[in-house]
């Protein structure tokens, strides 16, 4: 017997597409490998990351398009130095950090071309209007708004005006801030939106990830929802898939041992391949609300218990408790009929091992 879809699948049915790939609950989660700063200053390494992401089954490679000067000011003021002692970038000047981490703009085209050759999408997070203009020239199929930029409504307007699908991370954002960002995009004529639950720590702990927010985020906004995941491993992303996440984003590198600004919380190729496999399995397993057997279980009915005659009985003999038992296989009457059979007489000779049936009774 079938039934309604599960709560995890009971999400908005809006079907957004990135190029020809639908992003919705009817398909496995769209998997983004975030290159971020893991190029480590090498175009060859950046291209190798594209290849590794494609080999691991990612749907897209994602870049970040900015310069140190479009991101911040070259300033020695205390406020421009990272103070958080738990941050992997503690003590770094913002301008210096972004200058090291940024992807040179002249590298974007060969990376876009390599992604096209490998049949995966190439997306980016723009951080100002000039980056949007640049990416439009490259034919970017979609845009990502980073968590820290969710409050940059002028940037959201510029991105929304392209008419391309928008993926927006919600790390730290209140419901009011999320609502304002979504309304801003829609007012600019764009309702192709996926919102990502995100915890803006690097790395994030599972305990701080709160993926129960994902279906609530979708219901609250009417947008599809997913996860931008900064935890280690794939467990959180798999669980998010079971809660209805339609998109998963993970930082990706060739090897954490190679170092780099973002390497400590990035997945390696074998881990990304496992994530691809396990999120697909989780998505397949959600299914629908269903009780009773499915077709694949038909042969397993043999192993259910049923009632069998356990010793030879001559015609007219009484079936007592020693003459009948609930055992495997399942070809006899169901065990619930045991009391109704005890005390009845058999109408013919019955051999030990005969499945109980009503036609044995006189």
Image: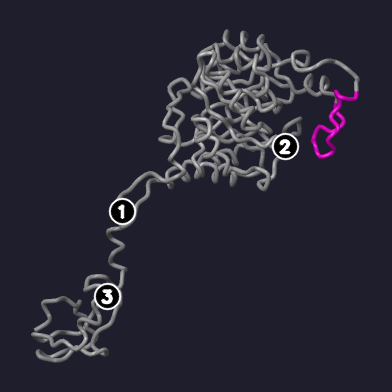
Residue, disc 1: 294
Q: Point out the stretch of residues depicted in magenta.
A: 78-92
Residue, disc 3: 336
**Mark 3 / mark 1, whichever is N-terminal:** 1
Residue 18 in the image: state x and y as whole percent: 48, 22
Residue 34 in the image: state x and y as whole percent: 63, 29
Instruction: In the rendered view, tell whether residue 119 sits above or below residue 70.
Output: below
Residue neighbourhood size for the residue with mark 1, other residues' Cα within 10 Å, grouped as few (<14), some (14–19), many (≥20): few
Query: Do the numbered discs 2 and 1 sit on residues whose CB atoms are within 8 Å?
Result: no
Image quadrant in which you'd find residue 82: top right
Residue 349 colored in magenta in the image: no
Q: Can you tell which mark lies on residue 201?
A: 2
**Mark 2 / mark 3, whichever is N-terminal:** 2
Q: Nearer the viewer, residue 103 or 46?
A: 103
Label 2 vs label 1, nearer the camera: 2
Residue at 16% in and 84% down: 351
Image quadrant in which you'd find residue 298: bottom left
Mark 1: secondary structure: loop
Residue at 31% in and 68% down: 303
Residue at 72% in and 37% down: 201
Residue neighbourhood size for the residue with mark 3, other residues' Cα within 10 Å, grouped as few (<14), some (14–19), many (≥20): few
Taking the image as shown, residue 141 lies to the left or right of residue 340, namely right
């Amino acid at each position: 017997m079938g039934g309604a879809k599960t709560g995890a699948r009971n999400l908005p049915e809006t079907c957004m597409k990135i190029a020809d790939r639908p992003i919705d609950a009817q398909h496995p989660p769209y998997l983004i490998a975030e290159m971020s700063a893991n190029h480590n200053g090498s175009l060859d390494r950046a291209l190798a990351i594209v290849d590794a992401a494609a080999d691991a089954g990612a749907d897209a490679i994602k870049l970040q398009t900015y310069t140190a000067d479009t991101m911040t000011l070259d300033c020695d003021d205390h406020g421009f130095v990272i103070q958080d002692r738990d941050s992997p970038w503690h003590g770094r000047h913002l301008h210096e950090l972004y200058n090291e981490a940024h992807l040179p703009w002249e590298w974007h085209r060969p990376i876009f071309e390599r992604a096209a050759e490998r049949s995966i999408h190439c997306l980016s997070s723009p951080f100002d209007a000039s980056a949007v203009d640049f990416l439009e020239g490259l034919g970017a199929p979609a845009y990502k708004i980073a968590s820290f930029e969710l409050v940059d409504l002028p940037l959201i307007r510029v991105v929304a005006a392209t008419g391309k699908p928008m993926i927006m991370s919600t790390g730290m954002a209140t419901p009011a801030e999320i609502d304002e960002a979504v309304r801003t995009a829609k007012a600019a004529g764009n309702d192709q939106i996926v919102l990502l639950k995100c915890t803006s720590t690097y790395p994030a702990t599972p305990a701080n990830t709160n993926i129960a927010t994902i279906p609530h985020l979708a219901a609250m906004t009417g947008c599809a929802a997913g996860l931008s995941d900064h935890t280690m491993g794939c467990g959180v992303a798999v669980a998010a898939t079971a809660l209805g996440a339609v998109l998963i984003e993970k930082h990706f590198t060739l090897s954490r041992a190679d170092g780099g600004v973002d390497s400590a919380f990035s997945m390696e190729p074998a881990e990304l391949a496992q994530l691809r496999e396990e999120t697909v399995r989780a998505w397949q397993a959600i299914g629908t609300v269903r009780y009773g057997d499915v077709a694949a279980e038909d042969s397993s009915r043999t192993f259910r218990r049923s009632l069998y005659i356990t010793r030879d009985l001559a015609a007219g003999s009484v079936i007592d408790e020693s003459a009948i038992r609930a055992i495997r296989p399942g070809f006899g009457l169901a065990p619930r009929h045991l009391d109704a059979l005890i005390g009845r007489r058999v109408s013919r000779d019955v051999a030990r091992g005969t499945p109980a049936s009503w036609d044995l009774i006189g």
